Image: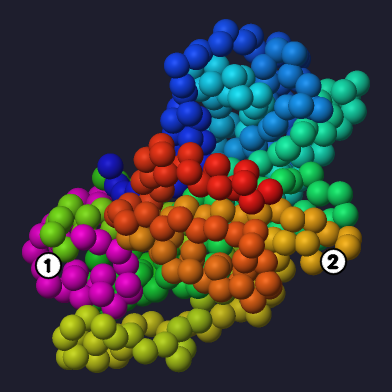
Amino acid sequence: MSGIRCRARAVTLASILLICVQLAVRPAHARDESPCTTGLLPGGAQYTIVAPQGWTPAAGELLILAPGYTFPGEQAEVPTVDEDVFLTLSAFGFAVAGVTYRKSGLAVKQGAEDLEELLAFFTGDPLQCGYGRANRIWLIGGSEGGLIAALVGERHAQRPDPLVDGVLAGCAPVGDFRRQLDYIIDFRVVFDALFPGVIPGSALDVPPEVGAEWDTVHVPRIRELIAADPARVEGLLRITGAAYVPEDPSTIEETVLALLEYGVRATNDALFTLGGSPYDNLARVYAGSGDPALDVAVNAAVVRHAADPIALAELEAFYTTNGNVARADEGGSDVPVVLLHTESDPIVPFWHAQQYQEKVLAAGAQEKHASFPVARYGHCTFDPMEVFTALFTLMMLR
């Protein structure tokens, strides 16, 4: 395994949530066999809908699953619900809808559009395959899917008749997405300064063959490097603030390989999608390794980059949360957002949850927000009870 990946995390987040509420009763509700349970949305995203037979929108609730990140060129999977989980859902009156995104790689902007299309499709005219407006609709997403769900939820909070009733976002980059991209690219920049020439190309110019040969060529080489120079590797982790467990050397390798893989396999697509580079380290001072001489050497060796204004404008318009989850005026509505985040997340750092909470406080919407920190290493490594508690809290906030 080359590192932690976000691809199926939204599905996992929802699945463990639903499994954990399986009580003693397992009712044998049949699935809705409508021909409209799977298909393509107008933008090209694929959807799937699972509803108990006889489900009615007036009394029923809907969970929409927003999947996490898929590396460019990889086939996205439509979130699905297995039979045991479905039986549990039907007992609680839930229908479930899942969606791919119309593109792989960075898909925040496109994913938000796909969620909006799924909402419109599901709540539309039954004669056109719609089900009608569900009693309550909850968005659940992990990692990139959590950001997408939060953005859609915030937008619905400003509408007079929102379709969304609340959002549960796990391990999501909701605090500052530009800072998230800086974090990923910084890791490659500092790695190159400490270990020049190990990975071909540069942080913002990755040859395609590097991604293609990542598992077979580069992962073994980096593993050898980690074993050969642990002090320098620890300096890399300290300077970048990447999470690891000092008492568990396996987490060092896991963090290093995962962050470098994102830097290698995700960067070119992100720059293309944003219309340029949002990364700027011209004034950044790198420090914190514990060795002043190493800090000086890193600052002398790192390649400096300036951000492209076009990319920054794109981030501000489509990738940036505002924390406005409560009714802004008589024309809006409450759409609570609950966060669940591991405190030692190496991919999407815990400061996202802290920064989002600051946004909510600034917006005066703290009564419609809750955040659950989890004292654990890993990306989206939640247990069922933690997810259930977060969802239950979300429903109470509404």
The residue that mark 1 highlights is: 230
Relative to 398, 124 lies left or right: right
The answer to whether any part of residue 64 appears in the image is yes
Circle number at residue 329: 2
Q: Label 1 crowding class (10 Å Cα cut-off): few <14, some 14-19, many 20+? A: few
The residue shown at (88%, 54%) is 160
Q: Is residue 383 above or below residue 37?
A: below
Tell me if 155 is positioned left or right of 27 in this view: right
In the image shown, does 85 or 184 lie closer to the viewer?
85
The residue type indicated by label 1 comes to Pro
**Magenta segment includes 240:** yes
Q: Out of 298 and 123, give the one closest to the viewer.
A: 123
Find residue 318 and report its horizontal and vertical position in percent. Answer: 69, 63
* Local SS, label 1: helix
**Where is the N terminus found, in terms of image quarters?**
top left
Q: Main secondary structure of the magenta part?
A: helix
Q: Which mark sits nearer the N-terminus, 2 or 1?
A: 1
Dividing the picture into quadrants, the one containing residue 284 is bottom left
**Which amino acid type is shown beneath numbered disc 2?**
Asp
- Residue at 65%, 80% (x, y): give it: 309
Relative to 397, say whether 277 is above or below: below
- Which portion, as a residue range, is magenta? 217-245
Residue 376, percent from left and from top: 30, 54
Question: Residue 356: percent from the left, percent from the top?
Answer: 56, 67
The disc label shown at residue 217, or none: none
Q: Is residue 98 left or right of residue 24?
A: right
- The residue at the point 48 percent across, 17 percent down is 84
Give the residue at x 61% y 73%: 361
